[in-house]
Image (tube, rainbow, N blue to C red):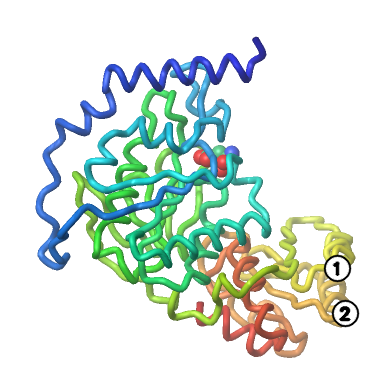
């Protein structure tokens, strides 16, 4: 039997074992019943109808043994089996599973992103659908969630969820993350807050959240903190997204069939100017330059970037630091070079925003306003 088959067989055994022993349900069932929702949330007349769309990732992963928390096979457990392994989910909502992909999220690309977005949009239009949960690999949750936050035209809750350990591992986090995600998606208080990301007891806005650690459960962080918590069955919001999203933006997923090519070039000591030329040759309409510090550009990189601009490619100075904002005309004369700077968007987020912005305009001044608005 090959390794993959052995892993899947063991995984199925471990998953059914947890089902039989009911460890997951025992832990959850004995927890205090969810207390009444905060007074601000309207009383719920019925259980919400939630569609859980499976795309793969670790939350659908399986390891060869319970001690494999970081070495495992990602994207092998079907979404219906994941839902069945957390019976508490069906106690808080009417859920239906749908498998759109079975991939590690590092394998997302524009085509798959558009396909997912269009399917979510289609489901949100159905009057009997109250909310959507998307199970997703954690590597690129931040890009998918930002994209949906900017392009979905609905105020219904959409929650992206993943896990850092497979369901077969000691200390697996996927079951509670999924339960919490369904709770948040079912809560009327989650409406109108844009696309949310729920993991590790926290509710983040898809705009701000990023994965900050390769293996730890508390890997997701937002520069300005989470919007709130999920604890003992309650979704607790303390902040609201400050930037326009979903119904407040100019992009509609249903009207976008292709995203312009936008490249990210990572800067470092001795970065090769050929990386800029390669991006231009590959047809990039914009280059997000993940620069050092406050968007600083090495002296030997200024001319290659100016040459790319002269060929009509938009140049965006971003920062590889992971937080802060890039100040226009500080490290470089952006007005003179006709370049753009990010606000606080990380390079991988700036790529998503620039691709969307380029579907509407190629005017650098208008593009700059997009970074300061969204
Ligand atoms: N292959 C990675 C992904 O699908 C695993 C990480 C995870 O899902 O937690 O994003």
Question: Percent from the top left, x then y, of residue 59?
Answer: 46, 37
Residue drawn at point x = 88 percent, y = 79 percent = 311
Q: In this view, does 100 lie to the left or right of 337?
A: left
Q: Quadrant of residue 177?
A: top left
Whichever of labels 2 and 1 marks the residue nearer the N terminus, that label is: 1
Check contact, mark 2 vs mark 1: CB within 8 A.
yes
**Crowding at mark 1 (Cα within 10 Å: few <14, some 14-19, many 20+):** many
Asked if the beta carbon under badge 2 is closer than 8 A to the nearest atom of ligand 1, the reply is no
Between 121 and 359, the residue placed more toward the observer is 121
Could you tell me which quadrant the N terminus lies in?
A: top right
Q: Is residue 339 above or below residue 365?
A: above
The residue that disc 2 covers is 311
Question: Percent from the top left, x then y, of residue 44?
Answer: 16, 60
Residue drawn at point x = 13 percent, y = 62 percent = 43
Q: What element carries label 1?
A: helix
Between 361 and 215, the residue placed more toward the observer is 361
Question: Percent from the top left, x then y, of residue 62?
Answer: 51, 26
The residue that disc 1 covers is 280
Residue 153 in view: yes
Ligand 1, image quadrant it occupies: top right
Q: What element carries label 2?
A: loop
**Crowding at mark 2 (Cα within 10 Å: few <14, some 14-19, many 20+):** few
Between 279 and 190, the residue placed more toward the observer is 190
Residue 273 in view: no
Question: Percent from the top left, x then y, of residue 275?
Answer: 84, 60
Separation (CA) of disc 2 from disc 1: 8 Å
Residue drawn at point x = 26 percent, y = 50 percent = 230
């Amino acid at each position: 039997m090959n390794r993959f088959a052995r892993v899947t067989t063991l995984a199925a055994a471990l998953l059914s074992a947890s089902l039989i022993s009911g460890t997951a349900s025992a832990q959850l069932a004995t927890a205090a019943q969810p207390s009444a929702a905060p007074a601000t949330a309207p009383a719920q007349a019925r259980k919400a109808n939630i569609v859980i769309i499976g795309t793969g990732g670790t939350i659908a992963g399986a390891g060869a043994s319970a001690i494999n928390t970081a070495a495992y096979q990602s994207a092998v457990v079907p979404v219906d089996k994941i839902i069945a392994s957390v019976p508490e989910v069906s106690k808080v909502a009417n859920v239906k599973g749908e498998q759109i992909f079975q991939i590690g999220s590092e394998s997302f690309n524009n085509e798959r992103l558009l396909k997912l977005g269009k399917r979510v949009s289609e489901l949100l239009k159905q009057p009997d659908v109250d909310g959507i949960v998307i199970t997703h690999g954690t590597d690129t949750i931040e890009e998918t969630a930002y994209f949906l936050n900017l392009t979905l035209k609905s105020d219904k809750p959409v929650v992206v969820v993943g896990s850092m350990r497979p369901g077969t591992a000691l200390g697996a986090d996927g079951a509670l993350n999924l339960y919490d995600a369904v709770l948040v998606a079912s809560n009327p208080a989650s409406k109108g807050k844009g696309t949310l990301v729920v993991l590790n007891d926290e509710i983040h806005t898809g705009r701000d959240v990023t994965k900050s650690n390769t293996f730890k459960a508390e890997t997701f962080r937002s520069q300005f903190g989470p919007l709130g918590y999920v604890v003992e069955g309650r979704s607790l919001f303390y902040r609201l997204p400050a930037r326009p999203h979903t119904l407040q933006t100019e992009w509609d997923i249903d009207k976008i069939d292709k995203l312009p090519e936008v490249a990210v070039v990572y800067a470092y000591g001795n970065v090769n100017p050929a990386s800029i030329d390669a991006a231009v040759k590959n047809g990039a309409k914009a280059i997000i330059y993940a620069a050092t510090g406050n968007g600083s550009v090495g002296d030997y990189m200024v001319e290659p970037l100016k040459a790319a601009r002269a060929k009509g490619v938009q140049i965006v100075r971003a920062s590889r630091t992971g937080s802060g904002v890039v100040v226009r005309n500080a490290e470089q004369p952006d007005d003179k070079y006709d370049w753009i700077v990010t606000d606080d968007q990380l390079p991988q987020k700036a790529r998503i925003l620039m691709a969307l912005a380029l579907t509407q305009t190629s005017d650098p001044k208008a593009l700059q306003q997009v970074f300061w608005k969204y």
